[in-house]
Image (spheres, grey):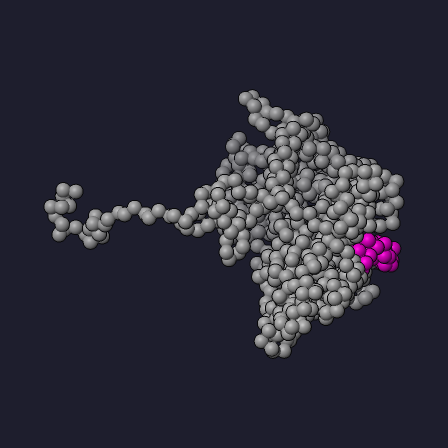
Amino acid sequence: MGDAAAQPANQPPLLKLVRDAQVLPRPPVTDLPEPDDDVPLYAARRHIYPQRVHGTYRRIKWIVLYLTLGVYYLLPFVRWDRGPNAPSQAVLVDLANGRFYFFFIEIWPQEVYYVTGLLIIAAMALFLMNAVAGRIWCGYLCPQTVWTDLFQTIERWTEGDRREHMLRERQPWTIERLGRTGLKHFLWLMVAWWTGGAWVLYFADAPTLVKDLATFQAPLVAYLWIGILTFTTYALAGHMREQVCLYMCPWPRIQAALTDEHALNVTYRYDRGEPRASVKKSEALRLQGQPAGDCIDCYQCVHACPTGVDIRGGSNLGCIQCGLCIDACDAVMAKIGRPARLIAYDTELNIKRRQTGERPFVRIVRARTLLYAAIIAIVGAIMLYTLATRHTESISVIHDRNPVFVRLADGELRNGFAVHILNKLLQTRNFVLSVEGLSDVDLRVPGIDGDNGRTVVVPVGPDQTREVRVLVSTYQALPPAASVRLTFWITDPATGRRASASDHFRGP
Amino acid sequence: MAEKHETDAITGTATTGHVWDGIRELNTPLPRWWLWLFYATIIWSVGYWIVYPSWPLVTSYTTGMFNWHSREAIITELDALKAQRGPMVAKLAAASLQEIVADPQLLEFARAQGRPAFGENCAPCHGAGGGGSKGYPNLNDNDWIWGGKLDDIAETIRHGIRSSDPKTRLGPPMPDFGRDGRLKRAEIETVADYVRSAAGLVTDPKADLAAGKAIFLQNCVACHGENGKGNRALGVPDLTDAIWLYGSEKAAIVDSMWNGRAGMMPAWAGRLDEPTIKALAVYVHTFGGGEK
């Protein structure tokens, strides 16, 4: 310090600034709360008892439930005749043989890229649904919603509707209550068990597997999967319910980022509903010519909600947009003689427009809906085109890597190839194998007698791949150039269809 | 105390009371079942300690309830695989080599079995695809020192060449004409010129082929034959074809004559079971050089 004071002029400016700086104590923060480590970081679950409703959207949900569950449970039993060389189940994932059957479509493992197309279409369909009417996937089509709906119906049937159920839960256990709850869990487990049972039927011949399962002849893995899916269905649809939507599912977060102001969301029309008051008070206010809302604060919308949301608070992460609150509210509106659809599929934008006296509008055709639809159409068209024009036969060739070529005793050159021939038809085909590219060649397949070195007939079984070793020798006096392009052809004389694959003939 | 549970005005969410540089932490509590699930996974992990080998001890480790061992698991899987292949292997054992080649299904199975067996046992000398190298015959070509029929190949694999097997293939080794002084360097070079010319290879125009032939007739015909075609019964190679196990250059031929040759191959009977030897014979035969 003494040196610095003695030679102030030589000091660099920054150091000088630091030296001269006065360190002041930070002013005390006065308005801070005391750190509180006792704040609960984990919230107890609030049990939800959704009330039964009747109405348009409930009807739509029933229809969707019947359709989707009907398809899921019964589809494995639908038959589709493919002849003697393939299974006769319309939809079958044949893991052992690496085949996927879907009615008239059969997919080989190397064609799984169709699944990529399906995934793109599925994602775009989800986005499109979201752009048109928010989370209608969540509200109507999601398996979690459909099964939860079914389980809640069972719950209402056994333990009673909202009030009855709540009341019963506050009373001591009686034989009746025990019986009702027991019956509920038994039915839940039955549905869950049948859900797991239907799942495994997609992986084997359904009628046979049902018989084997019943007689305990089925493979252990089948029982294991039924057990796993029974557990997951029982746990997710019976117990987890809205917790799956609120905490486990990523889609609500993605959806929130994808939505826009024109998407038709389940909306409380507060322009009509506010100010809230009782029926009598509202009527009195109206008679006086004072503003009165249609909402009578009856909480029917909240009681009907399967995720326990109050839709009157506006757009909400918990809302799966099933529309059951619309049905609940409409019933109340009908009773009090006010127009329906106080809650409706609508936009915040329209509320603002109505408030300023403008006409509300619905714009379904927008840039994003057009884009999503276009992508779906394009991907679908590409998939259809490739599916319609795909070949029923194909050939692939792998050149021997060691040795690359062989010199025979009389000096001629030979190359060895592993040739795979695919037959996607359901009958045996005799492919004529030939080679082009060298003028004087001898083509042989060990194990199959050929036509004096020019062609070899290779039989390939129905729906199979066959690998044959192919030896190509050349009698040319001079060895060919280091590499000559060869084309292997397979021709099916019965249908006239051809396929080819290219490789090279290599010499020294 | 009231200020502890302060509510954030914008989000309507309670705060935890933690503040960093004036930034208050909102309290968005996790569901309690999540916490229980977390504890359940910890308890579940304890199950692994009980069931599977886990904790290291001073000289060993905890073995777990069922004495599970990854090596034994693999052995079980291999046994299951062997059991699955059993019927086909039995067929392979029962069929003759000719029957195997005639049956497309058996041929495919034999080739599939032969490929890994070849890679494990034969490839170190003969190369991964049987391409061979100097001193180790190429099994793809159609030049066979001891015969290229299915049975010949199987016999060679079983008993080997100049091996310790009592039934081994045993032929006269190529003598070391130079080392033991039977022929002089110049004479050997003359014979090498003659052998090359007889095989249709380019030779030095100044070479004395007649002298070479004379020495060849005196020393080589006993094994290689008058026309140099060799003798398969004794494992004597053909000197007139395009295939040279030790090279066709003059220096290589001189080397063979000077130092002699006695290539050997181990016997595999006893080391490999009979179905594997059959599969190998078929696999090698279908490299492309097999004879009928």
Q: Quadrant of the C terminus of chain A?
A: bottom right
The residue at the point 87 percent across, 49 percent down is A207
Question: Does the image show residue A339?
Answer: yes
Place of residue B38 in the rendered image (x, y in percent of width and height, measured from the top left): 61, 39
Check the image and report above or below for A264 versus B7: below
Furthest-top residue in this view: B59
Residue A301 lies in what quarter of the image?
bottom right
Check the image and report above or below for A99 versus B212: below
Q: Is residue A71 magenta?
A: yes
Place of residue A421 in the rendered image (x, y in percent of width and height, measured from the top left): 74, 57
The residue at the point 62 percent across, 54 percent down is A250
Check the image and report above or below for B13 versus B171: below
Q: Give the camera-side residue of A498 and A462.
A: A462
The residue at the point 62 percent across, 72 percent down is A290
Q: Quadrant of the N terminus of chain A?
A: top left
Q: Which residues are magenta?
A: A66-91
Q: Give the camera-side residue of B141 and B62.
A: B62
Furthest-left residue in this view: A6
The residue at the point 33 percent across, 48 percent down is A27
